[in-house]
Image: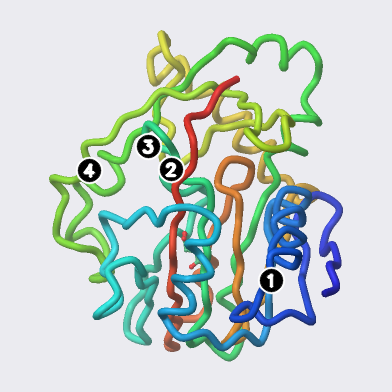
Amino acid sequence: MNINPVSPSLGATITDIDLTNLDDGAFNQIRQAFWDHSVIFFRGQYLTSEQFITFAERWSTINVNRFFKPLEGFPKIAEVRKEPDQRSNIGSSWHTDHSYDQIPAMASVLYAQEVPPIGGDTMFSCMYATYDALSDGLKETLSGLNTVHSSRHVFGNRRGETDDDNRLDNQDAAQQDALHPIVIRHPDTGRKALYVNGNFTTHIEGWTAEESRSLLGYLYEHAARPEFTYSFQWEAGSIAMWDNRVTWHRALNDYHGHRRLMHRITLDGVALSA
Ligand code: SIN
């Protein structure tokens, strides 16, 4: 296989590989690329839903999403769908998946089924590079801080505010709050990364939301700087797999009038530590 980085901060495309037929050596190479580049991309993959699940389960247990409708007959696969007549999409602002869980997801795997003729990219940002670029003084200030993450304000009370009908009608399931270090150490690479995001982080532990706003706001602006990001253009048959501990992503909503349909699997991780 060939592994080619796509930007200075994160991402690599892996070509000359068939994900339905991976021996242990090839799988280990892919896993190393995932640790090295934080997001890996494949093109021209034609997996059945069973094969998609088999590929995902090689990495970890599947974390069944509580909020998005599953693919019919496959509860382990969530649909990320936008229809031509819808205006809002899923995941349009920078975030990382499941940071509101006590044990956040290791990774998400997104498989493009149908894509608009142009637009609908997914952008990624690198939380290692974001952390590395902070001053020693700010790194020192952050060390030892924890932040609270929640799903309540995102999935708990927004029904009716968007034309997105892809969610399960289960706002009551949005009860998760979790405390995580603001800077984590990746469980496999040992590298430090910033672990906050504008969607799910509500405040710094022991600070009010208002007091937290300017520091978190600064970190969000810093982490979205173009030099830390990469925008992936989808084709049907493309797969992106990202490490939720050390990346952000956002789905661009610039293709009204066209369908975009993705299948997503999210994978269990381990407890995070500083
Ligand atoms: C998501 O936030 O998981 C969706 C990303 C995408 O559709 O590009």
Label drawn at residue 199? 2
> Seen in the image, is 96 located left or right of residue 84?
right
Residue 238 percent location from the top left of the image: 61, 79
Q: Which one is in front in this view, the residue at disc 2 or the one at disc 3?
A: 3
> Which structural element holds mark 3?
loop
- The amino acid at mark 2 is Asn
Decide which of tag 3 and tag 4 comes sooner along the chain.
3
Q: Are marks 4 and 1 in contact (CB under 8 Å)?
A: no
Distance between the alpha carbons at the discs numbered 1 and 3: 35 Å
> Seen in the image, is 128 located left or right of residue 92?
right
* Residue 101 in view here: yes
Distance between the alpha carbons at the discs numbered 4 and 2: 14 Å
Label 2 environment density (alpha carbons within 10 Å; few <14, some 14–19, many ≥20)? many
Snapshot colouring: rainbow
Decide which of tag 1 and tag 2 comes sooner along the chain.
1
Distance between the alpha carbons at the discs numbered 3 and 4: 9 Å
Foreground residue, 231 or 105? 105
Residue 201 percent location from the top left of the image: 43, 32
> Which structural element holds mark 1?
loop
Q: Name the residue at the front extreme.
A: 24
- Quadrant that contains the C terminus: top right
Residue 171 percent location from the top left of the image: 16, 49
Where 129 sits versus 33, above or below?
A: above
**Residue ID for mark 4:** 174
Decide which of tag 4 and tag 2 comes sooner along the chain.
4
Residue 169, quarter of picture = bottom left
